Image (tube, rainbow, N blue to C red):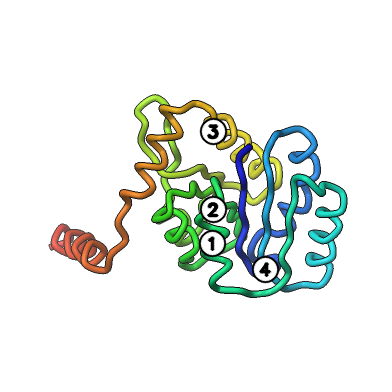
Amino acid sequence: MPLIGIVSRLAEQKGIDLIINKIESLLDENDFRFFILGSGEYEYEQFFNYLCARFPKKAITYIGHNNALSHKVIAASDYLLMPSRYEPCGLTQMFALRYGTIPIVRETGGLADTVREFNPENLEGTGFTFFQYNADDMAHAMRRALNIYNVQPYWDKIRLNAMNDNFAIRITAEKYLEIFESLK
């Protein structure tokens, strides 16, 4: 059973409202576990505590910030969910990629720059994305992700793609230099 993890501030900017809108029906209809680590707005914290009570075998909540645990959650998860309303950069998805954890992200800011939609036809891509800020599109991206979990060639390839992505400063600087050179 796959594990979808979230390591985030519990705030509207991070798309927590989208998760709250769909997570119960997704847990009812699909076979996965859900782990959220974070703190923030009280009503969001309360909801995720309720979720654990409703789904004691499928949902885990850790309210608070714990850097060491956050890396363990990311590394142990099969998927990392980041449905941010906006995300200027974002590091969490890059940690996930390095660990072979597949991001499910909204295409915005740094998330759009670092996560490429997986295409089962050519086996390219590093995660699953959605563009519109709405819960239905997020849920659709989550279902697409969950559908490949048991298709071993797809699962192996997307994880390999993710771990091979390189965000080293040298690589990034070379890409910027190429852009600047092309503008001459």
Q: What residue type is labelled 2?
A: Ala
The reply to whether the C-beta atoms of the residues labelled 4 and 1 are less than 8 Å apart is no
Provide the residue designation for mark 4.
38
User: Is the C-beta separation of discs 1 and 3 under 8 Å?
Assistant: no
SS state under label 1: helix
Q: Distance between the residues labelled 4 and 2?
A: 16 Å
User: In front: mark 1 or mark 3?
Assistant: 1
Look at discs 4 and 1 and give the one toward the viewer. 1
Q: Which of marks 4 and 2 is in front?
A: 2
Label 1 crowd (10 A; few <14 / some 14-19 / many >=20): few
Residue type beneath disc 3: Tyr
Real-space CA distance between mark 4 and mark 1, rounded to the nearest whole angstrom = 13 Å
- Residue in view at x 55 percent, y 47 percent: 79
- Check whether the beta carbons of the residues at disc 2 and disc 1 lie within 8 A of each other: yes
* First reached walking from the N terminus: tag 2 or tag 3: 2
Q: Which of 141 and 77 is in front in this view?
A: 77
Does residue 10 appear to the left or right of 145 in the view shown?
right
Determine the image quadrant of residue 155.
top left
Which residue position is annotated with label 3?
A: 149
Question: CA gap, disc 3 to disc 4?
Answer: 26 Å
> In this figure, which residue is indicated by the disc labeled 1?
72
Q: Is mark 4 on a helix, strand or loop?
A: strand
Quadrant occupied by the N terminus: top right
Q: Which of marks 2 and 3 is in front?
A: 2
**Disc 4 crowd, CA 10 A, few/some/many (<14, 14-19, 20+):** many
Q: Is mark 3 on a helix, strand or loop?
A: loop
Q: Position of residue 100 (x, y in %)?
A: 43, 49
Q: How many marks?
A: 4
Q: Is mark 2 on a helix, strand or loop?
A: helix
Determine which residue is flagged by label 2: 76
Q: Do the residues labelled 4 and 2 touch (CB within 8 Å)?
A: no
